[in-house]
Image (tube, rainbow, N blue to C red):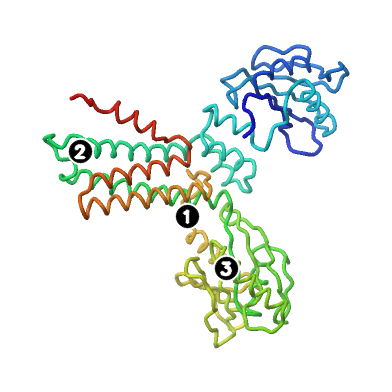
């Protein structure tokens, strides 16, 4: 980790030419360095027009300068922004001048890192900054903004708070066995554990949806040769992304195309037809298709509706949700239809595509998404799932043996797992909460 006492500098606007370019300084020497660059600084949080000069006094550019004194700044430190013309050459010259005056070039994400270290945001909010910048759809951008404002963190913190409170009650039962109320035997604790488990499961579902909004959905299109996989890719992407011929084995490698379904970024992966083959190149394509299936969030199994003997496809993973698609219904005189996870359509005419897209929305749990979702990442999903494992384990121990000690330990581990999401929960914090919640001397 870089020294957080350094003053760091970086160009804050994207690379390339633009009308305006922003340079950000953060650290104890930021006002002094910016003052030497600009001659003087305007009052805090007021923009002032200044000429930017290097250490030798040569003019580099002119623009606006704004001072944000810490701790009420993005990083919690003194921050200065220099807003000049968006020439990459000019911006680099100004950064070099700041370095000559004592600043250090910032590393990737170091401004957000300092914001976290200075308690200006938690880990989930810091990650939401990057998610907002990279959002590919309106829904993803809105979800990232909600996480940045703390919506996700509040839900995680509220669940962690409830786990801590329940552990305090359990610890009380262990520490004061002669109290009139037996906390463990009256069913109240078991009911609270069940309630916490339900809250964790709901949070896990929402985090899973948030992860899809952030990273997008990976859908593998698989099937036997000439089932119409490439035609389906072209139909869903609305252009001829893949070569379509009647020659089996035309697709040899994985072809990816990104589309939007219900505001969600979706990466479609058209794969080689799966069959036994002696062709080394095609065999490698089949191997990659099988690998793509296991990495997908959803599988489209495409079947040729004109084939009266559509045999099951080998190697389909049980852990990945699957939608069966009977393609080429226009050639057998059938109408588009849907039964459960089974859709009949024509990629060539487009009939039935709307049924497939609606099924994707339902399969991914996106029917109600968009109104209050937040962005999340796989590590958040893993941490919340880990917390759930320990809540269920503690619930089972309590039901089987009435063991308060084991329940308390499982609740502790569950709370620590949630603390990994935001970076807030520590054993010291838990210790302080126990002592402040009970009169130990009673």
Left or right of 159 on screen, residue 219: right
Which residue is at the front of the view, 26 or 156?
Answer: 26
Q: Are marks 3 and 1 in contact (CB under 8 Å)?
A: no
Residue 205, percent across and down? 43, 52
Specify which label sits upstream in the sequence, 1 or 2. 2
Q: Are marks 1 and 2 in contact (CB under 8 Å)?
A: no
Residue 204, percent across and down? 43, 50
Residue under the image location 64 percent in, 36 percent down:
109
Q: Residues within 10 Å of mark 2 (few under 14, many from 20)?
A: some
**What number is the disc on residue 367?**
1
Q: CA distance from mark 3 to mark 2?
A: 50 Å
Q: Are marks 3 and 2 in contact (CB under 8 Å)?
A: no
SS at circle 1: loop
Residue under the image location 56 percent in, 63 percent down:
296
Left or right of 3 on screen, residue 394: left
Which residue is at the front of the view, 98 or 214?
Answer: 98
438 over 33 or under it: above or below: below
Which of the 4 image quadrants contains residue 13? top right
């Amino acid at each position: 980790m870089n020294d957080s006492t350094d003053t760091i500098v970086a160009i804050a606007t994207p690379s390339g030419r633009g009308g305006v370019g922003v340079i950000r300084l953060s650290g104890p020497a930021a006002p002094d360095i910016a003052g030497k660059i600009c001659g003087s600084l305007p009052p805090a949080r007021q923009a002032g027009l200044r000429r930017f000069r290097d250490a030798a006094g040569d003019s580099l550019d002119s623009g606006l300068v704004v001072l944000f004194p810490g701790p009420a700044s993005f990083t919690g430190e003194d921050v200065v922004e220099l807003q000049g013309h968006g020439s990459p050459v000019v911006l680099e010259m100004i950064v070099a001048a700041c370095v000559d005056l004592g600043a250090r070039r910032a590393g990737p994400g170091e401004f957000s890192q300092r914001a976290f270290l200075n308690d200006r945001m938690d880990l989930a909010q810091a990650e939401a900054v990057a998610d907002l910048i990279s959002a590919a759809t309106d829904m993803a951008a809105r979800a990232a903004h909600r996480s940045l404002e703390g919506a996700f963190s509040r839900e995680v913190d509220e669940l962690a708070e409830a786990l801590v409170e329940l552990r305090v009650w359990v610890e009380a039962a262990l520490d004061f066995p002669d109290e009139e109320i037996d906390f463990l035997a009256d069913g109240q604790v078991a009911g609270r554990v069940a309630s916490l488990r339900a809250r964790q499961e709901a949070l896990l579902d929402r985090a899973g949806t948030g992860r899809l909004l952030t990273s997008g959905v990976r859908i593998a299109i698989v099937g036997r040769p000439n089932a119409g996989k490439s035609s389906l890719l072209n139909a869903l992407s609305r252009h001829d992304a893949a070569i379509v011929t009647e020659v089996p084995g035309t697709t040899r490698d994985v072809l990816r195309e990104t589309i939007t379904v219900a505001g969600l970024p979706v990466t479609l992966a058209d794969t080689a037809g799966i069959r036994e083959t002696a062709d080394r190149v095609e065999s490698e394509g089949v191997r990659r298709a099988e690998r793509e299936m296991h990495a997908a969030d959803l599988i489209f199994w495409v079947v040729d509706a004109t084939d009266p003997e559509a045999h099951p496809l080998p190697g389909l993973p049980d852990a990945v949700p699957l939608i069966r698609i009977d393609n080429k219904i226009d050639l057998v005189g059938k109408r588009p239809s849907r039964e459960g996870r089974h859709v009949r359509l024509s990629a060539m005419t487009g009939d039935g595509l709307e049924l497939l897209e609606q099924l994707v929305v339902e399969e991914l749990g996106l029917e109600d998404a968009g109104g209050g979702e937040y962005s999340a990442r796989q590590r958040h999903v893993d941490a919340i799932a880990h917390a759930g494992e320990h809540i269920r384990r503690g619930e089972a121990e309590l039901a089987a043996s009435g063991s308060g000690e084991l329940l308390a330990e499982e609740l502790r581990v569950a709370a620590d797992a949630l603390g990994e999401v935001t970076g807030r929960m520590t054993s010291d914090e838990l210790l302080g909460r126990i002592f402040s919640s009970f009169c130990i001397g009673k």
